[in-house]
Amino acid sequence: MKRLTRYKHARAESHARAIPERGAHLWVWGRAFVSAVLTLSSPAFAQSENLLPVPSGQPVHLSDVLLDNNPGELWVRFRFIAPKIGSTVGRIGYDVASADMEHLCQTLAVAYVAKYELDPARIVISLSDRSIEFGRSEPDATQFFEAYRLEQSQCIWEGL
């Protein structure tokens, strides 16, 4: 928990940037938090590769949680792998996946932000059909993104 303490300390007292100017920083406590949430809320999900329940029923798991000050304000990015998304027949399209992203924001991101006492300007939920390094382009990959702001523990869609 030392990183969390240092992060809060830097933001609260010295106003030093917790994230390098060139981009996002992996928040290492993310997977532990999700594992704890899944274990406490549903042992079945914890046993099935940490899959997260979403309205579409597609398999979704958390890849990364990133804290990003690069836009000039704190954005918390939740990156998920959803291997069934895509634009071809038989794949889960954006129209269905957008409901999944809103659900992930409301059920996972809100709890995460509260637990770590973060005050982000935006929460970004992304789904990718495969693991992609943050900031890298992969032309064959499918990725969907949504941005939200928090108001009274509610995710309000911002659109990107």
Image (spheres, rainbow, N blue to C red):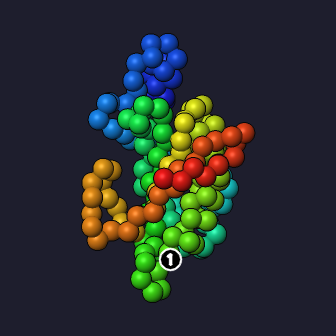
Q: Position of residue 61 (x, y in %)?
A: 49, 61
Q: Residue furthest top?
A: 13
What is the residue that sits farthest to the bottom in this orientation?
89
- Up/down of 91 relative to 103, above or below: below
What residue is shown at x 65% (from left), y 48% (from top)? 155
Helix, strand or loop for disc 1: loop
Residue 111: image x %, image y %?
A: 64, 44
Q: Residue 99: x percent and y percent?
A: 61, 65
Indicate left or right for 119 with 77 as reference. right
In the displayed structure, 79 sits above or below 98; it is: above
Left or right: residue 46 compared with residue 91: right
Q: Residue at x 46, y 46 (%)?
A: 77
Circle 1 Cα neighbour tier, 10 Å, few/some/many (<14 / 14–19 / ≥20)? some
Give the residue type at disc 1: Ile
Q: Position of residue 116 (x, y in %)?
A: 57, 34
Which residue is the site of mark 1? 92
Identity of the residue drawn at 53% across and 45% down? 123
The residue shown at (40%, 64%) is 143
> As displayed, is residue 28 above or below residue 98?
above
Identify the image quadrant of residue 100. Answer: bottom right
Q: Nearer the viewer, residue 86 or 109?
A: 86
- Residue 41 is left or right of residue 158, and the answer is right
Q: Which picture quadrant has residue 10?
A: top left
Residue placed most toward the observer, 24 or 72: 72
Residue 2 can be seen in this image: no
User: How many numbered marks does the figure carry?
Assistant: 1
Asked whether residue 103 appears in the rendered view, the answer is yes
